[in-house]
Image (cartoon, rainbow, N blue to C red):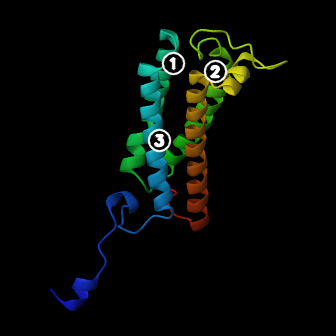
């Protein structure tokens, strides 16, 4: 081994490089996005199995876990492609909206089956439960934050790739 070979940096892992071996723009953001989507799949699965809501909501949360899991394999296998990142962006926003709409519907189940109408004048049941700290609403708010974080990471990654002209593969 020559001295030049001994000081050459090690190649970046496959998840951080494109097909040609070059580092893709936004590689650390891509790793964060992939981790966030994986956490979302796990959180939805955990909420479906261990949530404090009825069987109907468990099925909804299981379906959302499956929907999240469609983004994950392509994010891992094709880090240079923008298609999976776009899918993560749109899915993250859509799920955040669905969870926001679910908050008032889960108001009666989130605090152990007691109706959450003690929050104040004019506040809806979901808002009252979110204020009083019901378990279901706090879990739902955590999921919303996780999904919006994934959407923001995906949007930033797409913008960075568009600015550099890289990663425009489907």
Q: Residue furthest right?
A: 121
> Alpha-carbon distance for marks 3 and 2?
20 Å
Q: Is residue 124 above or below residue 143?
A: above
Q: In which quadrant will I find the N terminus?
A: bottom left
Q: Give the residue at mark 3.
A: 37
> Alpha-carbon distance for marks 3 and 1?
18 Å
Give the residue displayed 72% in from the left and 21% down from the top.
128
Asked which secondary structure carries label 2, the reply is helix
Lower position in the chain sequence, tag 2 or tag 1: 1
Disc tally is 3
Circles 2 and 1, Cβ within 8 Å, touching? The answer is yes
Which disc is residue 103 wearing?
none
Give the residue displayed 47% in from the left and 41% down from the top.
37
Circles 3 and 2, Cβ within 8 Å, touching? The answer is no
Q: Residue furthest bottom?
A: 3
Asked which secondary structure carries label 1, the reply is helix
Label 2 crowd (10 A; few <14 / some 14-19 / many >=20) = some
Q: Give the residue at mark 1.
A: 60
Residue 41 in view in this figure? yes
Q: Give the residue at mark 2.
A: 102
Residue 81 in view in this figure? no
Query: Looking at the rendering, which quadrant does residue 16 occupy?
Result: bottom left
Expressed as whole percent of the image width and height from the top left, the position of residue 77 reads: 36, 49
């Amino acid at each position: 081994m020559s001295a030049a070979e001994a000081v050459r940096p090690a190649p970046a892992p496959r998840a951080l490089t494109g097909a040609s071996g070059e580092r893709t723009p936004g590689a650390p953001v891509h790793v964060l996005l992939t981790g966030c989507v994986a956490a979302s799949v796990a959180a939805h699965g955990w909420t479906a199995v261990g949530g404090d809501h009825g069987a109907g909501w468990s099925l909804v949360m299981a379906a959302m876990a499956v929907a999240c899991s469609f983004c994950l394999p392509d994010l891992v296998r094709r880090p240079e492609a923008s298609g999976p990142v776009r899918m993560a962006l749109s899915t993250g926003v859509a799920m955040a909206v669905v969870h926001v709409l679910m908050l008032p519907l889960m108001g009666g189940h989130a605090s152990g089956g007691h109706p959450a109408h003690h929050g104040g004048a004019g506040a809806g049941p979901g808002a009252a439960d979110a204020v009083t700290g019901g378990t279901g609403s706090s879990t739902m708010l955590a999921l919303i934050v996780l999904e919006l974080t994934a959407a923001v990471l995906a949007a930033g990654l797409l913008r960075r790739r568009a600015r550099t002209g890289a990663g425009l593969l489907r």
